[in-house]
Image (cartoon, coloured by chain):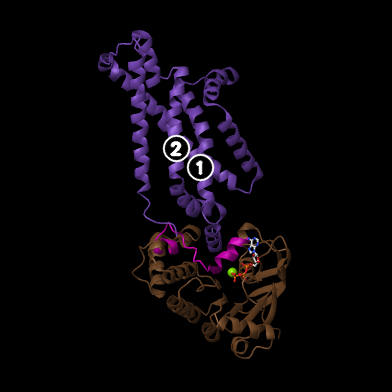
Chain colours: A purple, B brown
Amino acid sequence: MNYTFQFGVLAEYGPYLAGGLWHAWWTSFPSIILTTVLGVVLAAMHLTRSILLRGAAVVFVDLFRTLPVVVLLIWIHYVMPILTGISSSPTTSSIIALSLNGAALACEAFRGGLAAIPPTQTQAAQSLGFSRWQVFRYVTLPQAFFATLPSLTNVHITVIKNVTVTVLIAVPEVMFRAQELTIQFFRPLEFYTGAAILYVALIWGYAVFMRSLEKLQKWQPI
Amino acid sequence: MSAPDPFVRVHGVTKTYGAGPVLNGLSLDLAHGEVLVLCGPSGCGKSTLLRCINGLETIEGGSITVGGVRVDGADAATLQQIRLATGFVFQNFNLFPHMTALENITIAPMKIRNVSKRQAEEQGRALLAQVGMPDKAASFPFQLSGGQRQRVAIARALAMQPSLMLFDEPTSALDPEMREEVLQVIQRVHHEHGMTMIVVTHEIGFAKSVASRAMLLDAGRIVEEAPARQFFTEPREERTRKFLRAIVNE
Ligand SMILES: Nc1ncnc2c1ncn2[C@@H]1O[C@H](COP(=O)(O)OP(=O)(O)OP(=O)(O)O)[C@@H](O)[C@H]1O
Ligand SMILES: [Mg+2]
């Protein structure tokens, strides 16, 4: 190996590289919110009596969890404008792609959590006069939420990791900047190691935050 | 003058799960204010019957009416009306574990009857006092004993001011010391509200003092039906005598 480390370049360009985190966060954060909300909606659709809604949810989940994120992203950013005439910014395209993929995963996570709630809970709520929607809203979903948190955290982490593929459509996040700097200074090791550290820090911080949410559960299952 | 229509009428009801019938052409009538005790060996269909009366199961044959309203085949809105008028107390309490005792009681009045939070909580606290737990409003179910959980479950059902209460073995998951406190609450509820009740229980002492009628169910049919005192002291059927001997020896 005849590579001379020059981590000094990071002292100079590190702040620019780290600035990519801002873009990474503002791409992943809206995606995480959309992923979660859509995931709950899809899980609820799975539980309705309407065949149409159930079918739509099944198709959605199967489609977006099988479509590779890169294909989905390129398709939304470059093919959608051809079909619809509407083009969106790289960040918006990325949020759409990451949310569609994430929602399919989140739906399955919520469905797992909901399945773990004993059917007697639903019976008790129904016997009080709750409608199917109210049973979901007030009884099963709040209980499933905490059971789902660990797997939901994994889904969110996947969404954040997927931000790195937005380099393909030039969202100026960390990977994009690492690539840019490498081309300019021929220092791949320094800049990509920097990118790795920054993403690990972001995702680790997020995981710690999600774990702290678990402490909000003041009750225990019986 | 003809007799008034029964409050609960179960007529020729058949219910099947896969293999054989669980309820086999079962009929019973219950007048307003009556307390019916239902006994029978495990698996004879007691819980299934209660669930059918509450519209939680669909039936294949016969008909069920509560307060003159047809339960089987009812649409969602009618079913909700029937369930609002019926309180169901389960063997395993089925409290909502993520809500405090008070929230368990107030959630249905607030969300279904649109009662204000203040009013619902006032009523909830009164009900908790009525079941002897005025100091447990803020406790979660996991922090309560079995007997306390069941008393909260009874208060939760009462909060909707039902005219019919269905109890499915309300004390059989409890230690003997806790049974008495729950049975007393049920007894008090009957005396104070004169509520119509169907109670699945093998507590003979309780049944004799509260029930107007008792019934033995076996293999989805009624084996014997009699005034409670007579049922427990001088049953006609050999099957009933055998069953009563078995539960006394338990
Ligand atoms: N959801 C279900 N699916 C299939 N079979 C069921 C279901 N619920 C009850 N059964 C069967 O129906 C029969 C009657 O059940 P049920 O719960 O009504 O009995 P039970 O008289 O309440 O008994 P126990 O005293 O044990 O509570 C049993 O053989 C049971 O296995
Ligand atoms: Mg039972």
| Residue stretch in magenta | B78-105
Where residue A35 sits in the image (x, y, percent)?
Answer: 48, 36
Q: What residue is shown with label 1?
A: A109
The reply to whether the magenta stretch includes residue B92 is yes
Residue A154, numbered label: 2
Placement of A164 over or under B81, stated as above or below: above
| Mark 1 vs 2: CB contact within 8 A | yes
Label 2: state its secondary structure.
helix
The residue type indicated by label 2 comes to: Asn
Disc 1 residue type?
A: Ala
Residue B34 in view (yes/no): no
Up/down of B87 relative to A18, above or below: below
Quadrant location of the N terminus of chain A in the rendered image: top left
Position of the C terminus of chain A, as image quadrant, is bottom left
Residue B217 visible to the viewer: yes
Q: Quadrant of ligand 1?
A: bottom right
- Separation of residues labelled 1 and 2 (CA atoms): 9 Å
Mark 2 C-beta to ligand 1 under 8 Å: no
- Where is residue B228, by image quadrant? bottom right
